[in-house]
Image: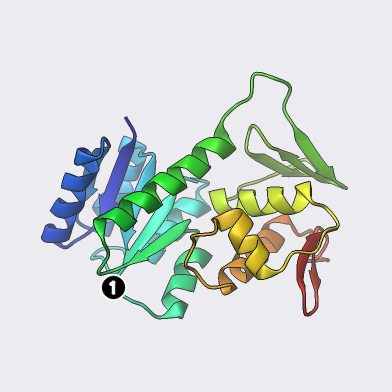
Amino acid sequence: MKKILIIEDEPNIRELILYNLKTNGYDGIAAEDGIMGITMVHREKPDLILLDIMLPGKNGYEICRELRDEGNNTPVIMITAKTEELDKVMGLEYGADDYISKPFGIREMMARIKAVLRRYEITTELSSAEDTVIIIDDLKINVERHEVKVGDRSVELTLKEFELLKYLAENRGRVFTRDQLLNSVWGIDYAGETRTVDVHIRHLRQKLSDGKNDEQYIETIRGKGYKAR
C-alpha cells in the first residue's frame, strides 16, 4: 500500500483528503504545519507528498527546496489556492513534480496522484537485465537505476527532470518544441504552461553544467525548442 503524506493546515481539507486517500486504497498520513511535515517526511518516508504552499512554520516552497537540497526525490504535488502562473512556476522551480489549485475536484486529485506515482515507479524500477546507460560525452544516464553522472560526479534530479533529460537523450539530435515535450514527458492531459519546460531545462543545465557552458548537453534552438547535443 502506497503511503501518502498530506501537509495541510486547514482541518476540513486535510480530513477530506485523508478520507479519500484511504477510500482509494492509500495509506494516508497528515501533518498540520511545515515543521511537522518535514519531520514526518524523514520519519515515515512516504511514497508521495501532497504539499500545501501557505503553511505555518515553513511554507511549501521552503519544504520542497529543503527536501531537494538534501537529495530527497520523493514526488511532490503542490496544493495551492493561488492561481497565478508565477506561483505555479515557483513550485516547479523548487522541485515539485505537479500542482493542483484550490478548489479542486477529488477525481482530479486522485488522477494526478496515480499519474505521478506511475511515472515514478516506471523510472525507478530496476531491471533484471543489464542496465541501459545512455552516454553523451561525459554524461551518463542509467535508465533503470534512475542515476545520472557527469564524469565521476553524481547528479541528483527530480523525477520530472530525469524524465525530461532521458527523453531528450534518447532522441539525441532531434529538436522538440515546448508543446511536444509537454505532451511526451508530462502527458497529453497535462494542463500546465509551456514555461514549465523552460524551468526544468534551466534546472537541468544548472545541475549538469561544468560552470563554463550551460548548453553543453542541452542546446536551445532559437524559435524552435530544445535538443540534446
Give the residue at x 38% y 45%.
48
Relative to the observer, which residue lies in front, 188 or 91?
188
The amino acid at mark 1 is: Ala
Near mark 1 (Cα within 10 A), the count class, few <14, some 14-19 or many ≥20, is some
Q: Nearer the viewer, residue 229 or 59?
A: 229
Which sits in the foreground, 160 or 20? 20
Whether residue 8 sits left or right of residue 228 in the image: it is left
Q: In the structure shown, which secondary structural element does the residue marked by tag 1 occupy?
A: loop
Location of the C terminus (image quadrant): bottom right
Residue 195 to residue 135: above or below: below
Q: Residue 103 falls in which quadrant of the image?
A: bottom left
- Residue 107 image point, x, y percent: 29, 54
Quick one: 204 or 79, which is closer to the camera?
79
Disc 1 target residue: 81
Name which residue lies at 63% across and 24% down.
Answer: 127
Q: Residue furthest top?
A: 128
In the picture, measured across the screen, residue 70 lies left or right of residue 226, that is left
Residue 213 horizontal/vertical position (percent):
83, 66
Give me the residue at 62% from left, 49% from top. 163
Name the residue: 24% across, 44% down: 21
Residue 216 appears in the figure: yes
Colour convention: rainbow
Query: Would you say 158 lies left or right of 15 here?
Result: right
Residue 53 in view in this figure = no
Instruction: Quadrant for residue 123, please give it.
Output: top right
Q: Name the residue at the front extreme.
A: 188
Locate residue 135: give its quadrant: top right
Q: Residue 18: x and y, percent?
A: 19, 47
Quadrant containing the N terminus in the rendered view = top left
